[in-house]
Amino acid sequence: MIWIEIIGFVGSGFAILTYWMRDMLALRIVAILSCVFFIAYAAMIGSYPLSLMELTLLPINTYRLFELLRPRCGPVAPLPRRPVTE
């Protein structure tokens, strides 16, 4: 029974750590780890509300992580004009 509580405490630790983060990439990775541990913990203790919340947060954090990793295509600068010669 103690290992189930350890999984819950690890998830809690990751959740607390997300509030400490300044870098969004690290925050999303830690938030995903928190979700994974809480999903496992919720399944072991049979907590449907916790499962539902974490199963909702996991794809949101994963999507936001992929947004951060995806190369950005910002506004394209116009090509310089050649001087007109007559």
Image (cartoon, rainbow, N blue to C red):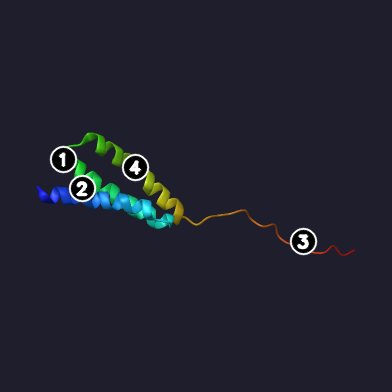
Pointer 3 and pointer 2: residues touching (CB < 8 Å)?
A: no
Residue located 16% across and 48% down the image: 5
* Amino acid type, residue under disc 4 in the picture: Leu
> What is the crowding at mark 1: few (fewer than 14 residues within 10 Å), some, or many (at least 20)?
few
Q: CA distance from mark 1 to mark 2?
A: 10 Å
Q: CA distance from mark 1 to mark 4?
A: 19 Å
Q: Give the foreground label among 1 and 3.
A: 1
Q: Nearer the viewer, residue 75 or 56?
A: 56
The residue identified by callout 1 is: 45
* Amino acid type, residue under disc 1 in the picture: Ile
Residue 72, image x, y percentages = 53, 55
* Left/right of residue 64 with respect to residue 53 in the rendered view: right
Residue 32, image x, y percentages = 32, 50
Residue 8, image x, y percentages = 20, 48
Q: Nearer the viewer, residue 18 or 57?
A: 18
> Mark 1 or mark 3, which has the lower sequence index?
1
The residue identified by callout 4 is: 57
* Amino acid type, residue under disc 3 in the picture: Arg
Residue located 70% across and 57% down the image: 78
Q: Which mark is residue 8?
A: 2
The residue identified by callout 3 is: 81
Pointer 1 and pointer 2: residues touching (CB < 8 Å)?
A: yes
Image quadrant where one finds the C terminus: bottom right
> Mark 4 or mark 3, which has the lower sequence index?
4
Q: CA distance from mark 1 to mark 3?
A: 67 Å
Pointer 4 and pointer 3: residues touching (CB < 8 Å)?
A: no
